[in-house]
Image (spheres, helix red, strand yellow):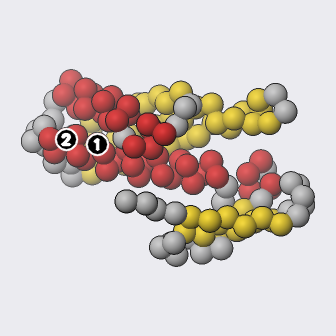
Amino acid sequence: MKKSASAHWSGGIKDGQGTISTDTKVLREAPYGFKSRFEDGAGTNPEELIAAAHAACYSMALSLGLGNAGLTADSIDTQATVTLEKDGDGFSITAVHLACKANVPGADADTFDKIAQATKLGCPVSKVLKATITLDASLES
């Protein structure tokens, strides 16, 4: 299975503009640029998209892990925060923090934590990232 997206950029780094599109058209020429990436300008940015992908992947993978343990979540809410830091002449994504709250009937805290921590390492987006990935997972009742 292969999924793809594309980006177009024109102009310099600070005055240029770009668009991002996905084959599914969920994103269709979504604007991005210096201001949306490094300031508070309108549009998206690569780090926000990585965060969205990681949060979605983690939530789905946690559902799978819970299911393998005979549990079904009523809800899983995950927020991913991507850290972009200056690295020499450029920048690097140095960390991703996942914050997950899940309502899982019948789950005890130890079982949930074991599955949540294993999912942090095993979700496909976690595997592709070289950044340090941390997690706060809480089981709600």
Which residue is at the front of the view, 8 or 45? 8
Q: Residues within 10 Å of mark 1 (few under 14, many from 20)?
A: many
Give how far across and how far down residue 38 sits, in percent.
77, 47
The image shows residue 32, relative to residue 92, as above or below, that is: below
Does the image show residue 109? Answer: no
Q: Do the residues labelled 1 and 2 touch (CB within 8 Å)?
A: yes
Q: Which mark is residue 66?
A: 2
Label 2: which secondary element: helix
The image shows residue 53, relative to residue 135, as above or below, that is: below
Q: Which amino acid does label 2 sit on?
A: Leu
Q: In which quarter of the image is residue 127?
A: top left
Give how far across and how far down residue 49 sits, in percent.
57, 54
For marks 1 and 2, give the CA distance.
6 Å
Q: Residue furthest front?
A: 1
Residue in view at x 50 percent, y 52 percent:
52
Q: In this rendering, would 59 be left or right of 90?
A: left
Residue pointed to by mark 1 = 62
Q: How crowded is mark 2: few (under 14 residues within 10 Å), some or many (20 or more)?
A: many
Residue in view at x 38 percent, y 31 percent:
121
Give how far across and how far down residue 15 sits, in percent.
90, 60
Give how far across and how far down residue 89 sits, in percent.
84, 33
Does the image show residue 106? Answer: yes
Q: Which amino acid does label 1 sit on?
A: Leu
